[in-house]
Amino acid sequence: MPTYRDEAVILRTHKLGEADRIVTMLSRRNGKIRAVAKGVRRTSSKFGSRLEPFMVADVQMYKGRSLDIVQQAESLGAYGADIAVDYERFTAASAMVETADRLNEAEATAEQYLLLVGGLRSLSRGEHAARSILDSYLLRVMALSGWAPALDDCARCGAPGPHRHFGAQLGGSVCDACAPAGSPRISSSSLALLRALIGGDWTMVDAAAPADMAAASGTVAAYAQWHLERGIRSLEHVTHPSSIGAR
């Protein structure tokens, strides 16, 4: 069986036996990989710390029948330590890797890998509010997966916006004529913030009012979970933007 190398983000790990772990990774060229890292739970392991969640590594693997085998791992981005010491960063990162894991049951793209790496790097450096980085990641990865929300024209009829209604199951913002009875409303400022989050306008995002950030975050969470067809469990622990602003 051949060996191969790839860059990968560690998404999650599970104990196997007394000293091994099963490591789930999102790689740059080979999509999602599940591999056995033998002996990494021993204190003498040379690369155990490089195969922890939120870390980015250059890994060499042996192609197995059901699970590959990790042979080597060199650190490319040691983001785990800086993320783990901060609750807001940790919960945001947990939601990001959980989403990446859910989205990439099939083949992933290099763009999805790079987006996740960029998000984890930004979290580790504290460049922006953790929830804002998470929301931006969720919107962008949804777009890369073919589920970009309609934020200008009506998602149903294409009528030019902005519009006052937004529904996850509707595909984004919709006009009054297309909105079903009881459709959620969204303010123009929250809609503009969603555009800033997906477009990377961090000047606008960082200056957003807590109420608008809270509304946008709720919209993003509902939209992402609708398209994933199941909840993102880590989102339950992510700090709400309004509570951050109240500190």
Image: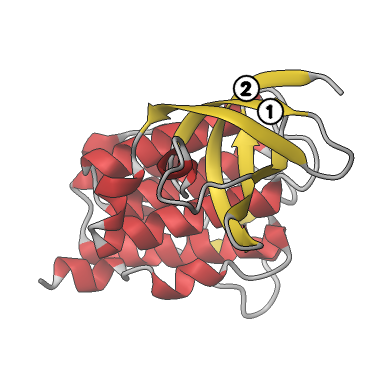
Q: In this view, does 191 lie above or below 179?
A: above
**Residue 162: horizontal and vertical position, in percent?**
49, 48
**In the picture, residue 33 is in which quadrant?**
top right
Crowding at dot 1, Cα within 10 Å, few <14 / some 14-19 / many 20+, comes out as many
As helix, strand or loop, the secondary structure at mark 2 comes to strand
**In the picture, residue 142 is in which quadrant?**
top right
- Residue under circle 2? 6
| Contact check, label 2 and label 1, Cβ < 8 Å | yes
> Residue at left 86%, top 45%?
66
Q: Locate the C terminus and report the quarter of the image it occupies.
A: bottom left
The residue sitting at the front extreme is 44
Left or right relative to 161: residue 93: left
Left or right relative to 236: residue 13: right
Spatial CA distance of label 2 from label 1 is 8 Å
123 and 62: which is toward the camera? 62
119 and 145: which is toward the camera? 119
Left or right relative to 1: residue 215: left
As helix, strand or loop, the secondary structure at mark 1 comes to strand
**Residue 217: horizontal and vertical position, in percent?**
41, 62
Q: How many labels does the image show?
A: 2
Question: Is residue 68 in view from this perspective?
Answer: yes
- Residue under circle 1? 61
Residue type, mark 1 in image: Met
69 and 122: which is toward the camera? 69
**Residue 75: horizontal and vertical position, in percent?**
41, 28
> Residue at left 77%, top 48%?
105
Name the disc covering residue 209, or none.
Answer: none
Residue type, mark 2 in image: Asp
**In the picture, residue 189 is in which quadrant?**
bottom left
